[in-house]
Image (tube, rainbow, N blue to C red):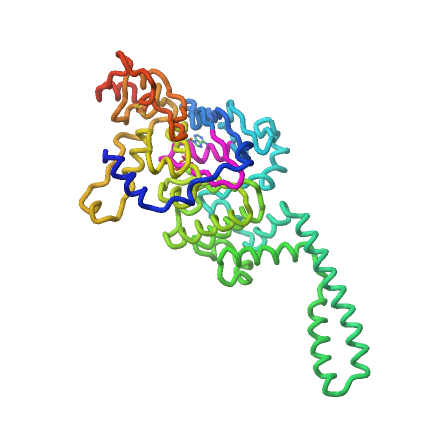
Amino acid sequence: MKNVKDMSKTFNNLDISGASQKMTKNDVKPLLIVKDLHTYFFTQEGIVKAVDGVSFTINHDEILGLVGETGCGKSVTALSLLKLIRSPGEIVSGEIFFDGIDIVEKTNEEMLKLRGNIMTMMFQDPMNSLNPVLKVGDQVSEVYLLHQMEFLKDELQKAKEKNSKLKENLKRMKKELKTCSPEGAETLKNQINAIKQQIKFRITINDIARREAAALLDRIGLPNAETIVNRYPHELSGGMRQRIMISMGLACNAKLLICDEPTTALDVTIQAQILDMIRELKRKLKNSVLFITHSLGVIYELCDRVAVMYSGNIVEYGTVQNIFKNPQHPYTQGLMTSIPRVTRESRAQELTIIPGMVPNLIFPPSGCRFHPRCDHAMVICKKIRPELHEMPNKVQVACHLFNKDKSGEEYRKLTEEEKQEDVL
Ligand SMILES: Nc1ncnc2c1ncn2[C@@H]1O[C@H](COP(=O)(O)OP(=O)(O)OP(=O)(O)O)[C@@H](O)[C@H]1O
Ligand code: SF4
Ligand SMILES: [Mg+2]
């Protein structure tokens, strides 16, 4: 693998001052606490240990990135937070506390009320998540109706008050019309007709929801939002559908927004626009975000902290600044050195890859699940699963390389044959 120190030089030259987060009073009480979460799928082939002892927190007004190879359990972790795991899957053990609410203990009925109001999720594939037979405007306004009724009622009240004022003006103008000059009468008649048009229809809560939906689509940069609200999902491009999905997530105004690879299917310019939008909206609304991605570049651009996931476990966890400066877990190091870099020096270098395959989650490797692929694997790595430990730079790392006393047979490096012995 490439020398990680060389790579950290590259990251040191970049301005990542915005990526670190100052401790605030809110950090003392995180918004979300996940403790030792185990989510398994009980399939005919065996038990898929998709999430196997995951712990992390998300602070108020923070973006936490969750990164890892395909199939490592990112989406299952996110779905567990919303209790959206369906049979044959189940949260086997662990705790999820959201703003003091014990999520694991909640019934399905209770979760129906909580989902969308406290946390909401943008899914990987917008086509599967949008209803193909409903106009997009109706789908976004339905979210407002479900989750922001109080806000809509306030807006309806304001609209009614505005209408009453317009009616009073209309009465006054009609009186004036009787006494004014013929020239003035023409202008007055036009004004009266304009007001009549405005108050012609009785405004309802659905109208307000639709108006807010169009305004939101406009805010997220969809051109001609007024027209787009009347289209069906199949009449929109992939990027537009993704924006609709994002707007539905935002319309909930939830405290935690879970974004599961919302930009993977998009081209880089749209991807950059959407990332800017999430960052900007988070800044304005001060909500928190769990951002799931394969891309370390996206994590680097967007997140405050990052949890690196491998085969159902979190193996490294800390601020983006510290982890990019000095990745310590061999898997994180492997991920970092496999990022293509466009520099004069890198043009001649080949990209490094992490050898081996993503483990089978029904029969995962013993001890540290990364041991069959790790250049540093030792005897102890096959026997004992390493726990997360805080390093001097405050990053948490799950790796036996950082154990204090590394003497004796337990710390002998494994041969290639020994590493592959129990791989299925
Ligand atoms: N309904 C299910 N039944 C059986 N196994 C499942 C089910 N859903 C997910 N899994 C398994 O759980 C593991 C984790 O899946 P998950 O979707 O969380 O991966 P991921 O990290 O989100 O991957 P990707 O980056 O490709 O989206 C995978 O091995 C997957 O096959
Ligand atoms: S615990 Fe062992 S196998 Fe796992 S990453 Fe660390 S050195 Fe490699
Ligand atoms: Mg996924």
**Left or right: 69 as drawn, with respect to 344:** right
Residue 35 percent coordinates (x, y): 50, 26
Q: Residue 17's quadrant in the figure?
A: top left
Q: Quadrant of the C terminus?
A: top left
Depth check: give the residue in front, 276 or 153. Answer: 276
Residue 3 percent coordinates (x, y): 24, 35
Q: Residue at x 27, y 12 (%)?
A: 408
Q: Is residue 315 above or below residue 338?
A: above
**Is residue 340 part of the magenta span, yes or no?**
no
Most extreme residue toward the top is 408
Depth check: give the residue in front, 246 or 32. Answer: 32
Q: Quadrant of the N terminus?
A: top left
**Left or right: 167 as drawn, with respect to 149:** right
Q: Is residue 274 above or below residue 43?
A: below
Say how many tags the image has: 0
Q: Residue 164's quadrant in the figure?
A: bottom right
Q: Residue at x 77, y 68 (%)?
A: 167
Q: Is residue 300 above or below residue 214?
A: above
Q: Residue at x 39, y 42 (%)?
A: 299
One can see residue 59 in this view:
yes
Q: Is residue 96 above or below residue 137?
A: above
Give the image quadrant in which the ligand numbered 2 is located. Answer: top left
Q: Residue 295's quadrant in the figure?
A: top left
One can see residue 365 in this view:
no
**Is residue 59 part of the magenta span, yes or no?**
yes
Q: In the image, which residues are magenta?
A: 56-80
Most extreme residue toward the left is 348
